Amino acid sequence: MGHDFERRLVLAVRAHGYDTRTARMQGLIREGLSGALDVAARRARLDRPSWGRVGEVGGELAVLPPGEPEPVVCDAFVHQVLGAVREHNRVTAPEGRLRLRLAINFGMTAGEAAGGYTGPGPVVARELAGCAAARAVLERGAAELVVVMSADVVEDTIAGQLTSLETKDLREVDAGGRRAWLWLPGGHPWPEDPAGAVPASEAAPDTATAPAPPAPGTGNGGGGPFAGAHIIAGTVAGRDVHQHFGDRT
């Protein structure tokens, strides 16, 4: 049975507040979500028809084939999702507007879209998309999109400097007992104290050289969306990540 499993990139997308909308608005949201993902993938030059997609209540689960480059999914695709969501919202009634939670995970997966997927890959992706920290960011702020990345994705792809993101752009949270990182693309400020935020003292790596957070009232006194956030980056090592170009073969 073990030979049926392989490590795959898995996306789980949820429309925030879907369960509070009327049946008519839920239909509009489902159409808008699918359309936004189609547009984003095309603009990022990803092969969305090859994705194994499963429609779920208020969202979608997608298992990507090996040829889809993880750095592009974590970077260009996310920016294009935000752009497509904003385009949708400009011409849609407030009750049908999209606000999305997008989880990205890399893990063991088996099955196919027709019969459903199993394994920790899709299970973790679903849990991240529904975690309290991601919900709190959208409930307490005005962002249209929050991205939740698993530890494998952050350590291998983001900390590996394979995208335009920096680790300082992310905020570590406790997602139901799992380490995860949130990203707010689009320049929205972080709401204060999102549920599940990990204090700097707990998020620090196991090293004696980790810097201590500045005391209140010290430092440069700057504000901005990351005021008060302590981000500590250590040395990471992960699986091999291959960037693909052209026909991605």
Image (cartoon, rainbow, N blue to C red):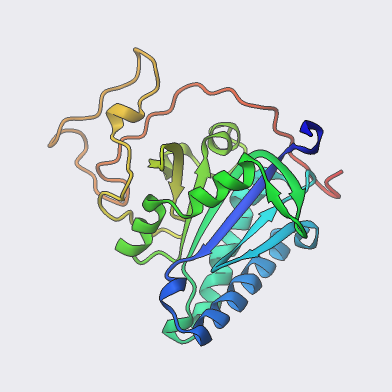
Q: Which residue extends farthest top?
A: 208
Q: Is residue 222 visible?
A: yes
Q: Give the quadrant of residue 214.
A: top left
Q: Position of residue 90 (x, y in %)?
A: 49, 82
Q: Position of residue 92 (x, y in %)?
A: 50, 85
Q: Residue at x 62, y 78 (%)?
A: 31
From the viewer's perspective, is 181 left or right of 9? left
Q: In this picture, is 210 found above or below 187? A: above
Q: Position of residue 14 (x, y in %)?
A: 52, 63
From the viewer's perspective, is 101 left or right of 206? right
Q: In this picture, is 210 found above or below 184? A: above
Q: Which residue extends farthest left?
A: 217
From the viewer's perspective, is 22 left or right of 133? right
Q: Residue at x 58, y 55 (%)?
A: 12
Q: Give the quadrant of residue 50.
A: bottom right
Q: Residue at x 42, y 83 (%)?
A: 94
Q: Position of residue 114 (x, y in %)?
A: 77, 60
